[in-house]
Image: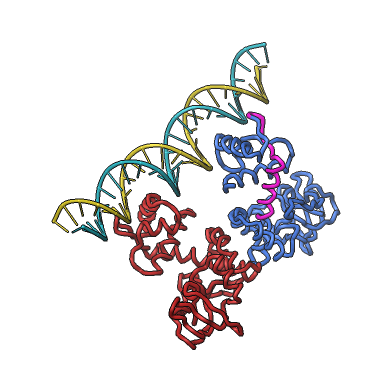
Chain colours: A red, B blue, C cyan, D yellow
Amino acid sequence: MTFSEENYLKTIYHLTAISDIDVSTNAIAEKMETKASSVTDMLKKLSEKDLVNYIKYQGVSLTDKGKLAAKMIVRKHRLWECFLVEKLDFSWDEVHDIAEQLEHIKSEKLINKLDDFLGNPTEDPHGDPIPDAQGRIIKVEKQLLSEFDKNQIGICVGVKDTSSDFLKYLDKQEIALGSQIEIIEKESFDSSFRIRVGSKELTVSNKIASNIYIK
Amino acid sequence: MTFSEENYLKTIYHLTAISDIDVSTNAIAEKMETKASSVTDMLKKLSEKDLVNYIKYQGVSLTDKGKLAAKMIVRKHRLWECFLVEKLDFSWDEVHDIAEQLEHIKSEKLINKLDDFLGNPTEDPHGDPIPDAQGRIIKVEKQLLSEFDKNQIGICVGVKDTSSDFLKYLDKQEIALGSQIEIIEKESFDSSFRIRVGSKELTVSNKIASNIYIK
DNA sequence: ATTTAAATTTAGACAAATCTAAAAATTATA
DNA sequence: TATAATTTTTAGATTTGTCTAAATTTAAAT
């Protein structure tokens, strides 16, 4: 499997995880910042290899084989992220690009040994689940902060947007995985939130609140 | 820099390290298991980028820029080998292929943090020196076991051949880095050696003795 | 010093992954 | 339901790294 094939599988996996319906050529092209014609070419190739179910003009989904392959890439990506943060002391906003490279290293033994070395973590530094060697995922029920009501209290267990900019913003506000967050007030005018994080109070926009997962 | 370019630089680096004279197209082709014509194409490209000194039909050498780039690849390779052996508990015959992949991961910060995490080792699991972040190498004067005389005693500090087969042979004979080796007898007929490793005595061929470094 | 052999380079082709531009199919709109 | 707009696919070109086969250069041998 080439790097490019792996990247397509991963993208299709992430896109189907959101809604479960077939993914469009354009959606893939947009996410991968490439052209629709390139996507079509690759979909034919992946279909030939039985990694995707592809019908011309009708969109695409992963086969069981493709889904397992995608999960193994995600597994590698997230385990490497754990390694970078926990062992090499990277911050959570720095690890994505490096993990994008490391996820393509081919060695099952390596990734399983890395898994053990890290203590078999179930979540990466952004709170996303890590598939096990068989592709099984432990799902944690969680809600977006924006769905919470006044006076509710929860613990930050993940982020939806994992961009460096957003993660740095959270660092600045001292919001991290494990932080206790309490809704003090919802502002109906702009849907912003007044929240308490630990002992501090602050106001966050709806966009911010829509990217923080709470349990 | 592409994977392929990096692999060529590394190969030229290793070949020049042996003799210091210019490397031939064929020597590169043989080492990389590719065709001479492919090598020629790449040499033109590397020359264009000022990474090698290349004169048609006259062989090739690395420029300062090329040598530094090559050293950084070797640095990455050997640091990853250390990681695999010391942290993930791989044996020294298993790490080469995985390190061949890992050496192409692009992030200076990563490799420097890895270096620190490992305690800034100066040698990899085969006894080969690890260039520092500036490309400096600490050279250890060492001899081949085959150059030793009767009754001399030394410590195994490295291996010349790092193939899995050879390393597994050494494991079987309980010869490892740090092992004390004493020449009991040199057999003039076939140039084989009777040696003592720790408390055990064994006979090794000249070929074996020519691939073990002693200090 | 020629001729022969070996090494190296050039020329042209190919596969992978991408692109642009044009054609075809689907979806939305009037 | 036609027609327009959008989406998707096809056709053909490009880049990178490789190959084969032929041509060229260098080295070796008579």
Tell me, yes or no, whether the highlighted magenta stretch contains residue B65.
yes
Residue B206: x %, y % from top left: 73, 47
Task: Name the foreground residue: B189 vs A62.
Answer: A62
Q: Quadrant of the C terminus of chain B?
A: bottom right
Farthest residue, direction front: A189
Task: Name the foreground residue: A133 vs A173.
Answer: A173
Q: Is residue B206 visible?
A: yes
Q: Is residue A131 visible?
A: no
Residue A151 in the figure: left or right of residue C22: right
Residue A32: x %, y % from top left: 45, 57
Tell me, yes or no, whether the highlighted magenta stretch contains residue B55.
no
Which portion, as a residue range, is magenta?
B56-77
Residue B89: x %, y % from top left: 64, 67
Residue B126: x %, y % from top left: 71, 56
Task: Name the foreground residue: B32 vs A97.
Answer: A97
| Residue at image coords 36%, 69% | A20
Is A152 drawn above or below residue A79 in the view shown? below
Residue B10 in the figure: left or right of residue B149: left
Q: Main secondary structure of the magenta part?
A: helix
Is B213 drawn above or below residue B48 in the view shown? below
Is C3 drawn above or below residue A15 in the view shown? above
